[in-house]
Amino acid sequence: MRKKATTVERILLESNLRQSIENSLETEDQLSDMERQDYINQINSLQATIKNLLSMIDTLRQTLESVNASSKRNEEVVKKLSAQIEAYQKQIRNLEDRDKRHNKNTFGQKTHKAKKRVDEKRGRDQEKDDYDGNHDSSDSQHPEAPQDEESKIDQTKVKSEHLDEKRGPRGPYTKMDAAEVDVLECDITGIPSDMKFIGFKDVEEYDRVSYVRCTCYKVAILEDKYGKRHDYFVPVDEKKAAGRRPNTNIIPGTHGTLEFVAYLATDAFQVLTPNYREGIRMKMDKFTCCDNTRMNWLKKGIKPLMPMLDIIKKRLLIPGSFVNIDETWEWVRIKIKGDGTDLGSYYKKYIWVLVNKETGMVYFLYDNDENDSRGSRPINTFLGDFKGTIMSDAFIVYKQLTRDNPELEHCLCWAHVLCKYDLAEEISKEPDAGWFRNQIGYLYMVENENILMERTPEEIKKRRSEKDVTDTLIALHDRAEYLLRTKGSKYSDLMVTALNYMLNGWDELLNYRNDGRYTIDNLEAERTVRPITRARKSSLHHSSEDGLQMALAYMTIIETAKRLGHEIKDFLVRAWREAIYGNNDLEALLQPAVATK
């Protein structure tokens, strides 16, 4: 339509021009030659101007059409994005409401309100660096969903949706397995004559039989001619005895079989069931036993396995190895002479965990001989003249280790740096903290790339030395120095702490690039120490240092066996059978498990 209108306008203009020319010709005899030429020049000039104006009008119209089309497209995009944003906001509100209900059900309304009041009192500059590298996200209060949003939802109750849709293909069926299968055959000889036999099908039912069985051997006591007594046992029913003999499958000094004590050990130190809860379970299993008796069985059971700890330590500290180290605390009751108590008092003591990812060895260490469980002496004594590399946080003891032992290289954990910037952004709302988190996140992206590409240690070291990683590290260091120099006084304590933490340990943070076997963080040790922290919440404390040493010995063996791929209960039974009734070759057991189909 616009092109047609433009053509009509041109026709009208040309018609007017012709009319003007004809009128001028009619008055030709009245104009001189010079006037006539001037008049013609003016007409030519007007025609050129009109032509230019028409061209500009066409250009402007085309531009306007393009803008209108683009505007419509933008409006459609905005509508789509607005709809998506509204949908996401609705999902967020639903998740927030569910989180509120979970907190209310977990903590109760009073606890939730009290925590809110405490959080409101904490100002930006009142937050202190009182964490050890791990933190939980702070609780936040979210507004309720508007009533008009809820009123739009269909309130019809249904059990499920999409029931009529066609089901997708089924995945592979995993058949259940049981320790004992009792097959009851069907007798088909009595089938009625008018029925046709097609075949058999399995109709299964699973039942849990939980009880403790006691085998009582009636052992004869004989006395020889010298008056010395001997035990004598020959079963009356050899089939019923099934080859069993007294004292051939028990932990020495106990009445528990290897399998039963292994069950108690896995319950206590893998499943982390407190002793009093184990007593409740024993009653459900129709077994009455004193709590101290079960603990004594465990103490007797760890003695034959103590040589295994020396083997684990030897493989843990192989020269040139990379070892992750962390520590955590535990309440321990200690009796001090003259303290005025019968059994002693509880003290906060520290446990060390060491992990060698390459060999799969794990060691839990407690040494409080000089009342310095967290000092440098226990870990320094354990490491001895170890020549290798350790990965840890910035605890001063680890830096002291490297100063005392020049053969020891120290790598600092990047996860602890990331956590400090995370807290500075989350609690103190520091905008610059997000930049540091993103840059450190890029370093972790490179590490994930190494894992996905299944690179060798040599390839990992080469990748960490490439320009993009180097530029990221240089940017982190330079920006931290610049911000402390120019804006340090304006930052919160958490942000200043994060910047200083990174710069003070900068050389140790870069050491992870020296070898492809090294990890960027200390999460190997952080994860391994979790059983201690979980047990601390359920068992609360250890009643003696001897009990703590026993628990750590079991956990050392159990965590090592887990890393080697063994089933813990079977591993303990094999280890006891080897240590008590075999040739005591415990080192052969500490090998990676062979996968079975």
Image (cartoon, rainbow, N blue to C red):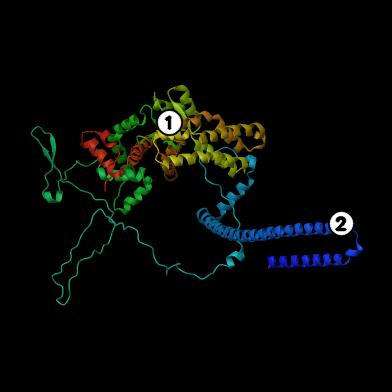
Query: Which amino acid lies under the numbered mark 1 shown in the image of this protein?
Result: Asp
Quadrant of the rendered image containing residue 543: top left
Which is more toward the observer, 283 or 150? 150
How crowded is the residue under tag 2: few (<14 C-alpha within 10 Å), some, or many (20+)? few
Quadrant of the rendered image containing residue 209: bottom left
Vertical order, 73 against 232 (above or below):
below
Residue 493 appears in the rendering: yes
Disc number for residue 76:
none
Rendered residue at 49%/41% (across/down) = 445
Residue 341 appears in the rendering: no
Vertical order, 304 against 92 (above or below):
above
Can you name the residue that lies furthest to the bottom here? 194
Instruction: Provide residue 385's location: percent of width, then percent of height.
Output: 39, 23
Which is more toward the observer, 220 or 160? 160
How crowded is the residue under tag 1: few (<14 C-alpha within 10 Å), some, or many (20+)? some
Disc number for residue 38:
2
- Look at discs 2 and 1 and give the one toward the viewer: 2
Disc number for residue 515:
1
Instruction: Provide residue 213's location: percent of width, then percent of height.
Output: 24, 50
Instruction: Provide residue 73's location: percent of width, then percent of height.
Output: 62, 60
Drawn side of residue 186 relative to residue 173, left or right = left
Image quadrant containing the N terminus:
bottom right
Drawn side of residue 450 relative to residue 227, left or right = right
Where disc 1 sits, the SS reads: loop
Query: Which amino acid lies under the numbered mark 2 shown in the image of this protein?
Result: Asp
Earlier residue among tags 2 and 1: 2
Which is more toward the observer, 384 or 232? 384
